């Protein structure tokens, strides 16, 4: 089949269309390359039908059908050609398409740990007063932090947690990481990109991510590494959303059952009782979350046919995260001045943003708890501990 066009444009032949597989054009863009004459209609649907007959596929279909090992090898081959780490996912995607004719989605091309953080709040426990916010590394699937907070819809709280993680992870910047090329030597570290849903509580985090990149890694703005922060619909923020499903399934539903066992013991309108419950349940829930994170990070994920992910098979998130070079990946943590981060944390409200009770009360409760020799706090004994401590508060 031949669709003729003026000589200044391309002639629409099967061979011509097949040659387009090496280009990064959509059907609409491909259609614009051809100018039909009076007798021939060249529409987007026509190009689509010819693509289908010739077996030419878009990035989504090609990514889903290509075996994982082949996809990973294509990405690793491109990364090997860029030891300085200057090419982001978009450039890697384009290079693969131009050299092989294989189109992959940008989402599968992750450079390694801290290339992207997936962040979100979890509200299943908000009904009992203990909302959660968390960050997960996209490449490895490793939980980087999960916190129970007084309010996960408050933008200062979200920004504080983001900055606290940046401050905490700076010591993990390694000599072989992408950040080395910029000569960054301090101890606070941020990802190449953070991702959240479109909630208003993430606005300050968005501003901080962009400001910190502009200040400390301006070079990233001139390469196709992607924005410092991007917004997605919740259903598309897949890494963290899948994690929430596991958290609720393994643990969250049980917490509510144990909470309801104290309904006859606890009157939230009595300040003395309310403060003690806030202190006890914060302590217990955070303890349980830390345990969940530890188990999840050491769990080998099940391989699901047809699911595309850059994490090597049969590897725990913790191992992949700790030794990315073994899997052809790079630690992408970007270094930032620690003092700047700490100053920002203090400026937006400091540690009080994540505290359920005043520090003086927390110190007193801690002393009473240990003086009574109550042992380990668990879901099964928390209301007994509440009854034992209440007369001393």
Image (cartoon, helix red, strand yellow):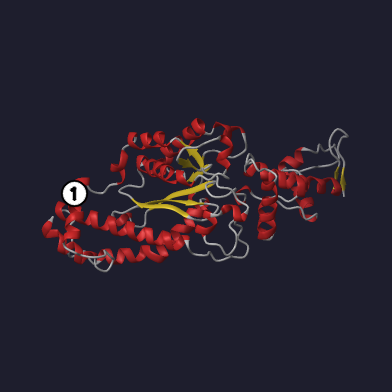
Name the residue at the bottom extreme: 380
Q: What is the x, y in percent for residue 163?
A: 41, 41
Asked where in the image residue 128 lies, by quadrant, the reply is bottom left
Q: Is residue 37 above or below residue 53?
A: above
How packed mark 1 is, by other alpha carbons closer than 10 Å (few <14, some 14-19, many 20 or more), is some
Q: Secondary structure at mark 1?
A: helix
Identify which residue is drawn at 41% across, 45% down.
168
| In the displayed structure image, the side of residue 34 where residue 83 appears, left or right | left
Query: Could you say which is closer to the camera, residue 315 or residue 41?
Result: 315
Q: What is the x, y in percent for residue 189?
A: 47, 41
Name the residue at the left extreme: 391
Identify which residue is drawn at 41% across, 66% down.
250
Task: Tell me the quadrant of the picture where the C terminus can be found.
Answer: bottom left
Residue pointed to by mark 1: 361
| In the displayed structure image, the side of residue 85 where residue 17 appears, left or right | right
Asked where in the image residue 387 lies, by quadrant, the reply is bottom left
Residue 274 shows in the view: no
Q: Is residue 32 above or below residue 272?
A: above
Q: What is the x, y in percent for residue 110?
A: 59, 49
Residue 116 shows in the view: yes
Asked where in the image residue 34 lies, by quadrant, the reply is top right
Q: Is residue 356 above or below residue 373?
A: above
Q: What is the x, y in percent for residue 224?
A: 62, 38
Q: Is residue 183 above or below residue 162?
A: above
| In the displayed structure image, the side of residue 369 where residue 12 appears, left or right | right
| In the displayed structure image, the side of residue 53 where residue 182 appears, left or right | left
Identify which residue is drawn at 21% across, 50% down.
362
């Amino acid at each position: 089949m031949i669709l003729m066009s003026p000589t200044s444009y391309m002639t629409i032949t099967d061979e011509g269309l097949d040659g387009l597989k090496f280009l990064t054009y959509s059907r609409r863009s491909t259609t614009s390359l051809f100018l039909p004459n009076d007798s021939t209609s060249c529409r987007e649907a026509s190009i689509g039908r010819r693509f289908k007959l010739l077996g030419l596929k878009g990035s989504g279909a090609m990514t889903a059908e290509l075996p994982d090992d082949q996809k990973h090898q294509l990405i690793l081959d491109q990364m090997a050609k860029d030891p300085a780490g200057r090419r982001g996912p978009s450039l890697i995607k384009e290079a693969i398409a131009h050299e092989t004719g294989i189109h992959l989605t940008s989402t599968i091309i992750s450079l390694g740990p801290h290339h992207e953080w997936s962040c979100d709040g979890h509200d299943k426990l908000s009904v009992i007063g203990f909302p959660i916010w968390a960050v997960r590394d996209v490449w490895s699937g490793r939980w980087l932090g999960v916190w129970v907070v007084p309010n996960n819809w408050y933008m200062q709280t979200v920004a504080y947690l983001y900055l606290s993680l940046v401050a905490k992870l700076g010591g993990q910047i390694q000599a072989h990481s992408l950040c080395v090329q910029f000569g960054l030597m301090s101890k606070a570290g941020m990802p190449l990109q953070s991702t959240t849903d479109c909630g208003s509580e993430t606005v300050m985090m968005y501003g901080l991510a962009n400001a910190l990149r502009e200040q400390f890694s301006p070079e990233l703005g001139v390469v196709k590494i992607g924005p410092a922060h991007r917004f997605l619909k919740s259903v598309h923020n897949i890494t963290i959303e899948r994690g929430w499903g596991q958290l609720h399934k393994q643990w969250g539903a049980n917490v509510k059952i144990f909470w309801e066992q104290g309904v006859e013991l606890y009157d939230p309108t009595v300040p003395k009782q309310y403060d003690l419950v806030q202190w006890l349940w914060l302590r217990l829930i955070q303890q349980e979350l830390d345990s969940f994170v530890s188990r999840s990070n050491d769990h080998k994920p099940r391989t699901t046919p047809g699911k595309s992910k850059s994490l090597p098979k049969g590897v725990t998130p913790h191992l992949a995260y700790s030794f990315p070079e073994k899997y052809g990946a790079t630690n992408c943590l970007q270094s930032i001045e620690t003092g700047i981060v700490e100053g920002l944390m203090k400026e937006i409200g400091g540690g009080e943003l994540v505290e359920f009770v005043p520090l003086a009360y927390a110190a007193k409760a801690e002393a009473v708890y240990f003086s009574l020799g109550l042992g380990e706090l668990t879901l099964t004994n928390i209301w007994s501990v509440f009854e034992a401590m209440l007369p001393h508060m």
